[in-house]
Each structure stands twice: as C-alpha cells, then as structure tokens.
Amino acid sequence: MTELSINALQTLTIGGILVSVIVCVLHVTNVTDITFDRTLREMCIVFFFTTVGFQADVRLLKTGGMKLVITTLLIALLVICQNGLAFGLAKMFGLPASLGMCTGSISMTGGHGTSAAFGSLLEDVDAGLQGAATISMAAATFGLIAGSVIGGPVANHIIIKKNLMGTAKAEGEGKPASSLVKVKRNTVDSYAVAAFQIALAAGAGTLLSDLISKTGITVPSYLGAIVVAALIRNIGECTGKIDINMDHIEDIGNIMLPLFLGTAMISLKLWELLDLAIPLLVLLTAQTVFMLLFARFIVFNALGKDYDAAVMSAGFCGFGLGATPNAMANMKAVCAKYGYSFRAFMIVPIVGCFFADMINSVVITAFINLIR
C-alpha cells in the first residue's frame, strides 16, 4: 500500500469517525436519527477483496519456501485461537457468542474491512444482536493501535535476549537476482482492462457466494470474489493468455478500501457501545496479551529463532491486531535499528495481504455457522 493510499485511508477513516460522532450527538440529544444507504459500502468491499484475490500468485510459494508455508499455518492457528479466546471470554461474561466474535479474528486479524463486512453479517445471523458492526469497528481501531504499540518492543526484546544484533543483512543482500513482477506500461486503456477484470471477478464471485449460501452455509459476499480472482490470476500466469497488470489492480484496490472504510465509519452507532465498555475492554486486552505471547513464543520459535523470525514477530503483531501496513511499519522500525531482513519483507506482505484474509474469512465463516 503506497504512502498516498495510506494518507487517503487515514483521512477518510478520521472523516467517517467525525461524522459518526455528529450522528451520535444528534441521536442522544433526540434531535434526529440519520441512516445511510449501504449499497456503495457493499460494492466497495467486494471490489477491494477482489483485488486481494488477484494477488494470489502460486509461484510465490516457491520463492517464499518453507517459511512461507509455516507462516501461513501460523496465521490459521492464530485466527482459530483468537476466535476461541473471544468465544470463551464472551461465555464467561454471559455475553452472546456472536457478540464475542466481534472481538475475535474479525476485528483483530481482519481489521476494519473485515469488521464492517462480518459485523453486518453477524447482525443478520443473530436477530437479537444489535451493534455488531459498531463493536467490531471499535475493536479493530483498538487492535490497530495495540498492534503498533507492542510490535517493536516484542522484536526488540527477542533480539536483545537472544543476542541477534549484527546478524541482520544489509538491505538488498540475499535478494534474488530476478523478479517475478512484470514491468508494464501505464495507460488509460490498461486501467480500463484492470477495472473490467475486477468487475468480472466480482460479479462471478458474488454468484458463487450466493450459490454457497443456498446450501445453508453463511459466507460473506466477497469470499467468492476472492476465489474467482485468484483463479483468473493463476490461469493467466500459467497459460499466458490473460494479461493482468497487478499495479493497476492494486491501485484500484487502494481506492476502494478508503472509500469503503469512509462509508462504513459514518454508519457507526457509537451509542451502542456504552453498556459494553468494560467487557469489551477486558476482551480486547486479553486479545492483545495473547498476541504478544503468540508472537514471542510461537512465531519466533516456529520461524527459526533467528533475526528474520524476530522481525516477522513484529510483523505478526501488526497484522494480527490490525492490518498489513501496521506490520510493515513495525518491521521497518525494527530494521531501521538493527538491519534489513529481506525474508521478512518478502513473506509478511504476501501472507498479510492475501493468505491472512482468505484463511480468516474461512475460519470466521466456520465459527459463525457453529454458533448459529
């Protein structure tokens, strides 16, 4: 995600929160109630996750090696544990399991995008649950901050305790001589082709999600779009018959995400959080402590107990509690102090941008269908 898109993300998110605060004030003072149409929001989230699906290049599995596989498995373990912890603590507080899910991997690993999408889905699944989207978005904001706070200190503690200083490589050292990324000329026509490919995958994927839903399994509308986009990408790469410009597709995705979050934030019903403030704080604190322990003792040990593993532990705190940009920021902060880690900067974006979202969506869907 480019610096420009991150700035747009921050601007629209903050703007959306300000609007939601105004709407909240108007509600609690009994001046008026304002509601927003969800059509644009749903369209933006489907298009964004479609661009995520296009990032699934199976050839990268060979480049990442066994550590990429292990990292992907760790993500699966993380999201299962996050949902299990959320479910257990919700039961302890006498809260609905569906409400506890709002503080699980939906908001932690999923971040704001998954929170808005699945929050609305939880409200549809549990007719008695009100404010799931608001709770999930608030939890995601908490996680975003917590992930940024604990990532650097976790890696710093590991590096000092294990005496890994000086083992980092200079930036670019160990980087493969060739790259799988194709350099393509930027034209208006190529953006139009990219937009058409996204629309095609999104449309076919929505139909796939609808077909799955008819079996009685609850799935988000964008899950099918991820699958179809991944198929198109890899068929194109294997056959050479489909020209896919990932730069343009990512650009469109970087437009869709801020638009989605902006429209999602203005719909927050902040007054619904008041009665749940203390239980939510306990649940979210527990998730933060668990993420810290998971990164320190499981991620670091499973990924080789070396400098790369320490840097990736900081990355895990970033996208395990927030988003991939958080993970990248955490790792950049660590590497600025101790040295570069090519393996970390190659593996974490791949897992964080695609595998984490896909695995998380599948696990969340399974948990939702279990608690129905």
Image (cartoon, rainbow, N blue to C red):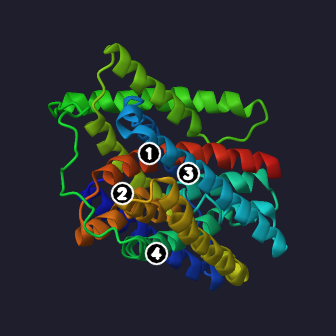
Please tell me which of labels 4 and 2 falls first in the chain. Answer: 4
Classify mark 1: residues with Cα within 10 Å, few (<14), some (14-19) or many (20+). some
Please give the label number shown on residue 308.
Answer: 2
267 or 360: which is nearer to us? Answer: 360
Q: Amino acid at mark 4?
A: Ile
Q: For mark 1, what is the residue?
A: 67
Q: Position of residue 124 (x, y in %)?
A: 74, 51
Q: Which residue is labeled 4 in the image?
A: 150
- Mark closer to the chain start, 2 or 1: 1
Q: CA distance from mark 2 to mark 1?
A: 10 Å
Q: Is residue 229 above or below residue 130?
A: above
Among the two numbered marks 1 and 3 on one chain, the one whose residue lies closer to the N terminus: 1
Question: Which kind of residue does numbered mark 3 sit on?
Answer: Leu
Residue at the spot x=29%, y=70% of the render? 165
Percent position of residue 169, x then y? 22, 57
N-terminal label among 3 and 4:
3
Q: Identify the mark nearer the N-term, 4 or 1.
A: 1
Per the image, the residue denoted by label 3 is 74
Labelled pair 2, 1 in contact (Cβ < 8 Å): yes
Q: Residue at x 21, y 30 (%)?
A: 182
4 or 2: mark nearer the eye: 2
Distance between the alpha carbons at the discs numbered 1 and 3: 10 Å
Q: Nearer the viewer, residue 171 or 97?
A: 171
